[in-house]
């Protein structure tokens, strides 16, 4: 739920969920390009694409939010059946005369369709933000993309009401969206082929607590009977995958998070030892020759297919991994799949930090069916729907801790979600603390090479000075933030400075909750 966060100029943003099997690679659109032009042909192509079931549409429904069916666009392919059976069908049965038509697209196609749809006044009533790049929801709210839903349905009083944050779901006192998914997750879960491990003499129940132990297991798996099996697959074609992987590994090495920020000073930390260690760990795996040699040409979905074909034993990816397998490669699940806690450099454990879950679905400003849309969306907050969402085995639902035990899910998925409760803590989000931050982020220009670019260049051998590259990126990013702060202060009158990224009351190992912002 796939979920898969996007970024601007190297800053970290709450990830758009759903970036898993459906669209593992977020669009590289910047916020400047977002409001620029893509040709009308892009929209036509996107609208002629896939519907929820992944089949070609027999006819193109009107994408506008006028009378007729309520139009719903998203990228969650593995959730297709669940959304139809457990959300739309029951709602339509209880509300005769209401029709919901859903269109599922891969993230890049969805992002392009939304851009052109907005310019041509052909927006759906409800849509996700996948494919729009690292654009803060607040920026889209300020541009008039959405309309509030808090007075149309009781989201504040719903089971997810405690997860509604200013600057993420609530703007100027109005609720615009809600988090159907949990923020307690990460995309570096070690998924393993249990049969392959056993064949290599590895007990799947013997978890590798450290990076060195994971390397050892990968070496044992590599080779196989025909010499064409590898310990791990690392889809290094996609810099976004490499970025998020290194950020998560760096956290296990002691880096703060989310946001790649030292919360005590507000400074970026890309040039610190945990990031160097994380990159060198990936280099070590490559030097061990345990990484599938085709990894440089693979994206995340390609890597999953290779893993499912038995070409690699371990793949670091998100909770949605098994949900995608069940949709596209169910035979791989039948052969045996399991998961471990994310390993750390040493036996002492460090936490992975994530942002609170962002809003996933939003009601278009142009929709004249906003109340119906809000009422459909509200059904996603119920414990019943949240249980169904867990059973789709994608991004963990917002109420994961409450529903996972009774949900009918694969044991590996249950283990994965349970591990998240132990391994992940919710960290600060600068935009929540100061709404001016999103304007700084919107003003910031992309810096290249960024973290993902650097990791890719190191893995391909085109660069060797890891520390030097990270320092240059960190310095350039810091300077760009200073420039952006100056611009929004002097030209737009926004009250924001570098202190907006300082959360002195943040404590390692603890969630940074609503009260913490008030006590900051």
Image: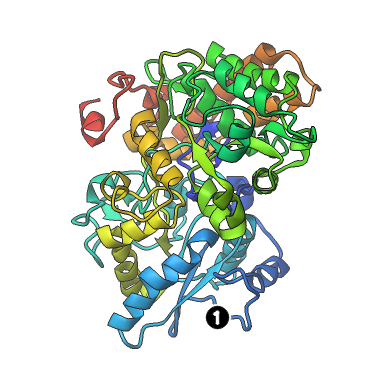
Of all residues shown, which one is farthest toward the bottom?
Answer: 97
Q: Quadrant of residue 69?
A: bottom left
Viewer-proximal residue, 420 or 429? 420
Q: Position of residue 293 (x, y in %)?
A: 78, 33
Crowd rating for badge 1 (residues with CA inside 10 Å; few <14, some 14–19, many 20+): some
State the image coordinates of residue 417 (x, y, percent, origin top left): 39, 41
Q: Colour scheme used in the picture?
A: rainbow
Q: Give the residue furthest to the left.
A: 157
Does 189 sit left or right of 168 as displayed? right
Residue 160, placed above or below residue 388:
above
Q: Position of residue 375 (x, y in %)?
A: 29, 70
Q: Residue 471 is drawn in which quadrant?
A: top right
Q: Residue at x 34, y 30 (%)?
A: 422
Query: Is 10 left or right of 413, judged from the image as shown?
Result: right
Residue 58 visible in rendering: yes
**Above or below, 273 relative to 152:** above
Residue 42 screen position, x and y as percent: 70, 65
Q: Nearer the viewer, residue 277 or 269?
A: 277
> Which residue is labeled 1 in the image?
62
- In the image, taking residue 309 as reference, residue 328 lies left or right, namely left
State whether residue 438 is above or below residue 377: above
Regarding residue 75, the answer to whether it shows in the image is no
Which residue is nearer to you in this view: 203 or 95?
203
Element type where label 1 sits in the image: loop
Q: Quadrant of residue 120?
A: bottom right
């Amino acid at each position: 739920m796939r979920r898969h966060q996007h970024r601007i100029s190297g800053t970290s943003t709450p990830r758009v969920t759903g970036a898993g099997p459906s669209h593992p690679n977020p669009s590289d659109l910047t916020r400047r390009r977002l409001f620029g032009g893509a040709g009308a042909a892009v929209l036509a192509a996107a609208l002629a694409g896939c519907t929820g079931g992944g089949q070609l549409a027999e006819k193109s429904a009107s994408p506008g939010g006028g009378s007729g069916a309520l139009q719903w666009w998203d990228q969650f392919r593995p959730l297709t059946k669940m959304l139809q059976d457990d959300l739309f069908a029951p709602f339509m049965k209880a509300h005769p005369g209401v029709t919901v038509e859903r269109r599922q697209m891969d993230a890049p196609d969805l992002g392009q369709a939304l851009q052109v749809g907005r310019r041509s006044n052909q927006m759906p009533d409800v849509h996700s933000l996948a494919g729009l790049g690292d654009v803060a929801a607040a920026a889209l709210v300020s541009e008039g993309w959405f309309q509030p839903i808090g007075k149309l349905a009781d989201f504040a009083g719903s089971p997810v009401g405690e997860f509604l944050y200013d600057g993420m779901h609530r703007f100027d006192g109005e609720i615009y969206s809600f988090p159907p998914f949990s923020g307690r997750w990460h995309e570096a879960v070690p998924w393993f082929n249990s049969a392959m491990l056993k064949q290599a003499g590895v007990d799947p129940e013997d978890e590798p607590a450290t990076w060195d132990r994971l390397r050892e297991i990968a070496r044992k798996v590599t080779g196989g009977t025909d010499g064409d099996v590898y310990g791990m697959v690392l889809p290094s074609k996609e810099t976004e995958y490499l970025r998020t992987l290194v950020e998560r590994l760096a956290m296990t090495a002691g880096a703060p998070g989310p946001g790649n920020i030292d919360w005590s000073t507000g400074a970026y930390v890309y040039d610190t030892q945990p990031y160097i260690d994380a990159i060198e760990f990936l280099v070590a795996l490559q030097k061990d020759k345990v990484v599938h040699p085709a990894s440089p040409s693979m994206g995340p979905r390609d890597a999953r297919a290779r893993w499912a074909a038995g070409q690699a034993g371990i793949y670091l990816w998100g909770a949605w991994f098994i949900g995608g397998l069940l949709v596209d490669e169910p035979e791989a699940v039948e052969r045996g799949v399991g998961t471990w806690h994310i390993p750390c450099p040493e036996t002492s454990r460090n936490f992975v930090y994530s942002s609170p879950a962002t809003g996933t679905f939003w009601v278009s400003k142009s929709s004249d069916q906003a109340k119906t849309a809000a009422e459909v969306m509200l059904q996603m907050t119920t414990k019943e729907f949240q249980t169904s969402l867990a059973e789709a085995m994608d991004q963990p639902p917002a109420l994961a801790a409450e529903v996972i035990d009774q949900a009918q899910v694969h044991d590996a998925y249950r283990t994965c979600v349970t591990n998240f409760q132990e391994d992940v803590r919710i960290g600060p989000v600068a935009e929540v603390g100061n709404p001016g931050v999103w304007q700084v982020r919107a003003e910031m220009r992309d810096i290249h090479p960024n973290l993902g670019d650097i990791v890719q260049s190191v893995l391909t051998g085109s660069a060797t000075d890891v520390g030097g590259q990270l320092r240059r990126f960190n310095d350039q990013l810091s300077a760009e933030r200073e420039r952006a702060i100056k611009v929004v202060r002097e030209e737009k009158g926004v009250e924001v400075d570098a202190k907006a990224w300082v959360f002195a009351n943040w404590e390692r190992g603890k969630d940074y909750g609503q009260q913490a912002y008030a006590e900051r």
